[in-house]
Image: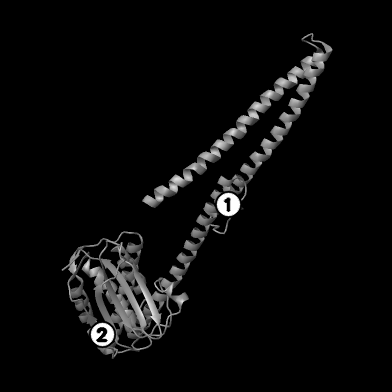
Amino acid sequence: MRSAQARSARQAPVTRGTLLRLGLYWGTIVVLAVGSCTLTFWLLASNSNLFNIGAQELFFVRAVGLIALALGAAGIFFIVGALRRVTVPTRDMMESAERIAHGDYSARVREQGPRELRSLARSFNHMAEQLNNNESERRTLIANIANELRTPLTMLKENIEGLLDGNFARDDAHMNMILGETIRLSNLVEEMRMLALAESSGLILQRELTDLNTLVQETVELYHRDASDHNIGLHAVVSETPLIAMVDPARIQQAIGNLIEHALNAPLKSDIRVEVSEANTLPDDPTDLAQIEIAYRAAVIAPDQIANYFDRFYQQTPRENEDESGLGLAIAKLLVQAHGGDISISSDARRGTQFRFTLPIEYIE
């Protein structure tokens, strides 16, 4: 809210300055026009000698009038040129806005004219770029969702058709396969719903004082069987002191679980360590933070990939487990941020890969 007010305060002088300049331009044109008409009248009157003045005075009046007319014409020419510097960029911006309104997000305007209009053109082009990026992300998202839905739907269709045609026996194996694909579809739809709620700030958190040590231990227990199925050791390391946070325990458990699932599905198998500890904060930072780290051995993630690692459907390597939708990391990030925390990832050949996120804690005993 504060940043929005600051932007409005910065933009208001631009609008007032442009309107003031336009007012001065038109006011000057009116004054010059009235003055030119008055001088023209005086010149015509002096040529007719309506005022019965002497030859010397008449010559002086004519000379002053001609000079004033020349200056007035030059002033009008200059003002018209200055107005053109304002009206041309404004017209271009209106045309580009019309193109964007009809779905052409490639429309851009040249940065020309007075300083205020150049600043407005930069803001307009930035807005158009954001709209273009949003449209590109929307199309990519739709394509990714269609791709994710295609596999389970195809499996369901083939199995149901096989059962109806008598090609498959109507036994528990095929029924379990159909049930598994149905659950997979249900989980994918729920993840997309969760992602939409979190991104639109519509996610409702049921906050309560929660011991993060206990929460981490309970989450690790839930995934022990999956880890055993992958022949992977899964260990919890808790703090010696209670770390109490005002969080939604189900959502934080979901964030930790998504990170654990990502580690379990890594191509390189290694033990996974989930550790909760007090985070080291800056000396002048009064906020107490707890840190939860999920560490495991995996292929080193390149720095340029780390920047996109929490994006929706982003995959560093092909997924070993097709049940992983590609939304888990994005959901984990949004859940952590909804609690006022930060999440990051680091990876190197010596220490492996670590996901870390922080949460504000209420007190430490």
Residue shown at 36% from the left, 84% from the top: 351
Q: Residue furthest right?
A: 55
Badge 1 density bin: few <14, some 14–19, many ≥20, Cα 10 Å: many
The residue carrying mark 2 is 234
Residue shown at 25% from the left, 89% from the top: 228
Q: Nearer the viewer, residue 97 or 296?
A: 296
**Label 1 sits on what residue type?**
Ser
261 sits left or right of 119 in the view: left
Q: Earlier in the sequence, mark 2 or mark 1?
A: 1
- What separation in Å lies between label 2 and label 1 (alpha carbons)? 57 Å
Q: Residue furthest top?
A: 52
Residue 171 appears in the rendering: no
109 sits left or right of 148 in the view: right
Residue 11 drawn above or below residue 261? above
Which label is found at residue 352?
none
Residue 129: x %, y % from top left: 52, 59
Q: Residue furthest bottom?
A: 231
Badge 2 density bin: few <14, some 14–19, many ≥20, Cα 10 Å: many
Residue 188 drawn above or below residue 14? below
Under tag 2, what secondary structure?
strand
Quarter of the view holding residue 267: bottom left
332 sits left or right of 308 in the view: left
For the C terminus, the image quarter is bottom left
The residue carrying mark 1 is 96
Quarter of the view holding residue 77: top right
Under tag 1, what secondary structure?
helix
Q: Nearer the viewer, residue 191 or 274?
A: 274
Q: Nearer the viewer, mark 2 or mark 1?
A: 2
